[in-house]
Image (cartoon, helix red, strand yellow):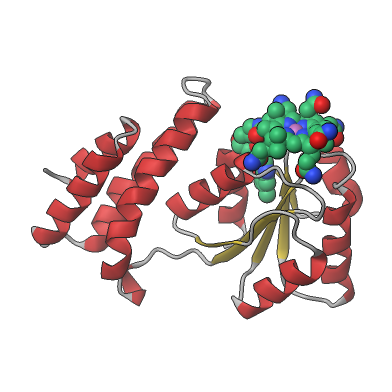
Amino acid sequence: MSVQNIFDAVLDFDEDLAVEGVKKEIAAGTDVSQILNQGLIGAMDEVGKRFSAGDLFVPEMLMAAQAMKAGLDVLKPHLAKGDTVTRGAVVIGTVKGDLHDIGKNLVAMMLEGAGFEVFDIGMDVDVEKFLATAQEKNAGIIAMSALLTTTMPGMEEVVKTIRAKELNIKTLVGGAPVTPEFARKIGADAYCEDAPAAVEAARKYS
Ligand code: B12
């Protein structure tokens, strides 16, 4: 076993091997940040690249993210504060009135895989909950998903409230009906068409 095996297990969508690999490396005394950065995060970076190149698709990306998450769950208790490459906290949710969460879950997993501390507050989330959670968790980014044209205005409400309260929080928006024009119009900081793009945008703000 080596960190490369963990990387390979994630790319093979193999949760059991990812877990086994992380356990073995911990037992062998391998630097936990190496397990995290080169093994788990490295693999998700590769997944993002392959997705963008059209070499793999949403179901595969979800399976890889699940393998990454299984490995990360084993590693988490071993991560001392200084070991994490925590790039900051992100609050993510699907806006009020909207119960679609598959894309949001994928974005959350990819962000977690990229080293962000992710607080997933679920679906049907109103402005108050987005802001209260961001402030409580000291998150620099709020990421919002909407799959219905009728719920997209919920994003604008969050952006407006952040502005009105002069909070230092960046907003990422996405979901099938959301467009770059809409994001610009409501004053969101970034529109991302998929989960790897969300990681790229979030990295810019961390
Ligand atoms: C699955 C699904 C459902 C499931 C949801 C299950 C779940 N747990 O999510 C169920 C059956 C519950 C459902 C219900 C409804 N649905 Co529906 N649903 C879909 C469907 C088929 C797929 C959505 C999906 O998961 N796609 C896969 C994911 C991976 O893609 P994604 O969400 O777009 O996410 C990617 C990107 O957009 C981006 N992204 C997503 N979120 C975010 C967030 C951020 C911050 C960033 C940066 C990026 C990002 O990254 C993701 C990964 O790459 C779509 C059709 C479609 N093709 O989109 C209709 C669709 C969204 N539904 C629709 C409708 C109308 C409904 C209902 C109103 C139906 C009804 N009459 O009851 C209800 C609404 C319920 C509610 N209040 O929300 C319409 C919306 C039309 C519109 N323009 O508003 C669609 C487009 C179908 C259609 N053609 O009519 N639905």
- How many numbered discs sit on the rendered protein? 0
Q: Nearer the viewer, residue 23 or 42?
A: 23
Q: Picture coordinates of residue 12 (x, y %)?
A: 31, 30
Answer whether residue 193 is visible to the viewer in this image. no
102 vs 117, left or right, is right
Q: Picture coordinates of residue 127 (x, y %)?
A: 81, 66
Q: Please state the quadrant of the image where ligand 1 appears.
A: top right
Identify which residue is drawn at 88% across, 61% down. 157
- The quadrant where residue 47 appears: top left
Q: Picture coordinates of residue 155 (x, y %)?
A: 83, 54
Identify which residue is drawn at 17% across, 54% down. 23
Identify which residue is drawn at 85% across, 55% down. 154
Relative to 49, is 18 above or below? below
Q: Nearer the viewer, residue 171 or 69?
A: 69
Relative to 175, is 33 above or below? below
Q: Which residue occupies the extreme left position in the image? A: 28
Q: Nearer the viewer, residue 97 or 88?
A: 97
Identify which residue is drawn at 26% across, 36% down. 9
Image quarter hosting the N terminus: top left
